[in-house]
Amino acid sequence: MAPSKAGSGHDKNDHEQLMAIVMADSFDDLFQPLSLNKPRCLLPLCNVPMIEYTLEFLASSGVNETLVVCKSHAEAIKSYIKQSKWARTHSPMKVKTKVVQQSRTVGEALREIDDAPFRSDFILCTGVVVSNMNLAPIMEMHSANGKRDKDQVMTMILQEATPQHRLRDKSDESVYIIDPSNNRLLSVDSLPSVPKANHLDIPLNTIVEVAEVEVRADLIDTNVYICSPEVLELFRDNFDYQTMRSDFIHFISISTLDSSTFYAHILTGTSGLDGLRLDDGQGVDTRDGSSGDFTAVSHSGYVAGVIDTSSYDAISRDMISRWTYPLCPDSNPVDETAYSYNRGAVYKAEPVFLGRESRVEHHVILGSNSHVADFARVADTVLGKNCGIGERSLVRGSYLFDNAKVSRGSVVEGSILGERVTILDNVVIERGCLIGDDVVIGPNVRIPEFTRVGRRQPQREEDSGFSDDDEDGDLSEDSEDVSGAAAVGRSGNANSDGVVSLGRAENETFDIQALGTSGVGYVWSSGSTGGDGDDDDDFDDSNDDKEHVITRDWLRKLHRIGTESSDIAVADEEIGRERAQSQAAELTPRAAEHAPEESFEHELRLTIKRSFEDNLDIEIASFEINNLRFTLNGNQDDMRRVIMQEILKFIDVSDLPGSAKAAISRWGGLVKKTLSSNLEQVMVVESVERFCALYDAVDAGARGRLFVLTLRFLYEFDIIEDLAIIYWHNKASEKVANGGEGVSAHLVQKAAAFVELLEEESEEEDDSEEDESEDESESEDEDESESEDEDESD
């Protein structure tokens, strides 16, 4: 039976304080073993505890008081809040904690909350929400709609998303039945992906009273809800409501006994740049519907919750790419962090120690006191404080928590390493692995993809189902053993690479067959299916198989040819040649129907063409292109190549050089935003050469002129450097001399004069620098001579 509406928050005084409830417990085990020692909400996201983003989001929305509901690790959460900025006297928001020790589900936790302070509309969300939105206008919308519909109890905030969107829960697809006239949520059904459901049962009572319905499967639950105070009463009156979406919202919405109603606020944008705005200056949009007029707001903002490791990866990438602005790494949300933003979306704290021959590529966060040794490569990765990457190691698409170490010659692909994890020499960690705190792996072993490794043994199957943050589960070791392991890790010995080796306690037997002779820890699961059978997609495989092959080839070549920096350039050139050899086929016109793997390139070309037609600003066009790349898991090398090709297609060959100059000066910035290394500049030259050599729409007589003019303007507008053009020409000339495979001898010859000019200018600059140096040296010698004469005179 529906609760009484007496005292409803719909008639609340405008001066009442806005409150929020944050569910700090996850009540699942998707992050184990990472969350054995601390709750998920305190795990670092871009080196900041996740709950910090949630509290910042609520404070910026005008929330005056927040209640953090926690179960496991409650003392850790309370301690963190007491030491944070939210405990200061001048804090804009008051934060309290509520411990619900006996609760094992969201429903049980909400039933333990005293609803006395919540006599007006409030915000309910998880403790792992990242958003740059301002919820105040949506709160006003909820309140205004509630005055028209006295039965309204909740507004769900949903996000539009394509089927390929990486924030979608691949194990549980939700279908929303909505009345489009007023956005009333008529029903919510969760359809499991295994086994795949091929039909949906819609109760007739949910749709018979409306003129039209929308069935939508393109929406993501953001885990943010605007609630009327009756929500807490409904949970208390119905003890079978354990989850928010599949129990509470689903069963009440289809119930014939409960008149409570739900509404959906659908976010149609993903940009964090435009901020939240109000329609007609008032935030209202009047429409005629079956329920009368209702209030809606349009917006463009970012909101997402970390529900699993896949969404953790996606949100981290969004933050590094600045989709969540101003919640970016360099905004320094916590006092102890201070990052500077550098080219290629590389964020550095102070101090950071980088070897002269190390390669820190795009989309990287380097925590304070992190070390990257010579010939090591780091890309698309977050390093916490005091992390170390040894010589000739590769860390890509991964997340290393504080004090994690990767030793010489090891590879870490698309995985998360907990605090004080040590990866010894020549270890390969394949994608999707979760390595818990204080684990040691190696040397000379390979950890299969989607393996979980913990410092403690996994709990027994018959006791499964405990919280992701449950510290009271039936584990083989007590907390004293874990603390001892941590102490051993902190006092371990460092090798020549600065990588700490952890010891082990006496009488402990670890899975050394899987983890190596020096391994410390236990394998929880292995193989491609993941530990729970539903974790196959823990990480998005944002790079295709070819990219993985190239990476491993790069490492093999690096080991084979030695440690000289010139040899690394050779290895990179070999890989670049492998990529260039496939570009001729990629320029061939494609069929009208695009295969799934081609969808990114197809959509990318359409997006670039629209940017040209609409004459968008470079920043906006670049944002949309990167948005598409992350949405469809596109490859950055492909993105760079396609951008350059579309710019070349934009050039009117009959109007050279004017058209080439205009096109590159106007749109060359799109290419420049994709460049973070000299090798990538060389790849741009290669893509221009392949286009001019193979694109049928360019007349054979104009190809040489188009090629040289493009190189000239790319150089003049500071998009690529002269050394990249010279380097490409030297290598291409060698290919021509050896038979010309994969390169046009005609274009190489046409570019010779321009390259010779670049070389002369470079030599003149060097000579000028040498002359200045000699003049300074002669001046110093004269000063010394005069000083000596004065001494002799004295």
Image (cartoon, rainbow, N blue to C red):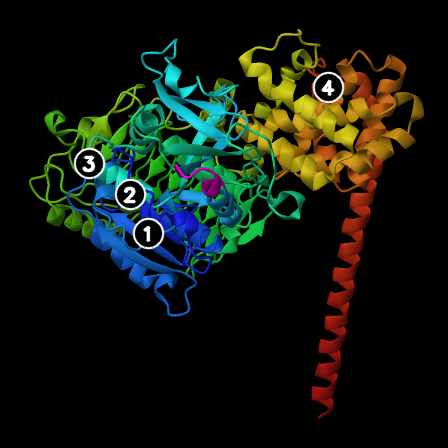
Q: What residue range appears in magenta? A: 145-152
Residue 737 occupies which quadrant of the picture? top right
First reached walking from the N terminus: tag 3 or tag 1: 1
- Separation of marks 3 and 1 at Cα, in angstroms: 46 Å
Q: SS for tag 4?
A: helix
First reached walking from the N terminus: tag 4 or tag 3: 3
Position of 77 relative to 707 (above/below): below
Tag 2: amino acid? Leu
Q: Nearer the viewer, residue 577 or 309?
A: 309
- Separation of marks 4 and 1 at Cα, in angstroms: 65 Å
- Separation of marks 2 and 3 at Cα, in angstroms: 43 Å
- Separation of marks 1 and 2 at Cα, in angstroms: 9 Å
First reached walking from the N terminus: tag 2 or tag 3: 2
Residue underneath mark 1: 118
Q: Give residue 751's mark.
A: none
Q: SS for tag 3?
A: loop
Tag 3: amino acid? Gly
State the image coordinates of residue 30 (x, y, percent, origin top left): 29, 32
Q: SS for tag 2?
A: helix
Residue situated furthest left in the rendering: 507
The answer to whether marks 1 and 2 mark residues whose Cβ atoms lie closer than 8 Å is yes
The local crowd at label 4, few if under 14, some if 14 to 19, many if 20 or more residues have their Cα within 10 Å, is many
The answer to whether marks 4 and 1 mark residues whose Cβ atoms lie closer than 8 Å is no
Q: Give residue 232's mark.
A: 2
Q: Quadrant of the N terminus?
A: top left
Instruction: Residue at 15%, 34% (x, y): give it.
Output: 457
Residue underneath mark 4: 690
Residue underneath mark 3: 521
Q: Quadrant of the C terminus?
A: bottom right
Magenta highlight on residue 151: yes
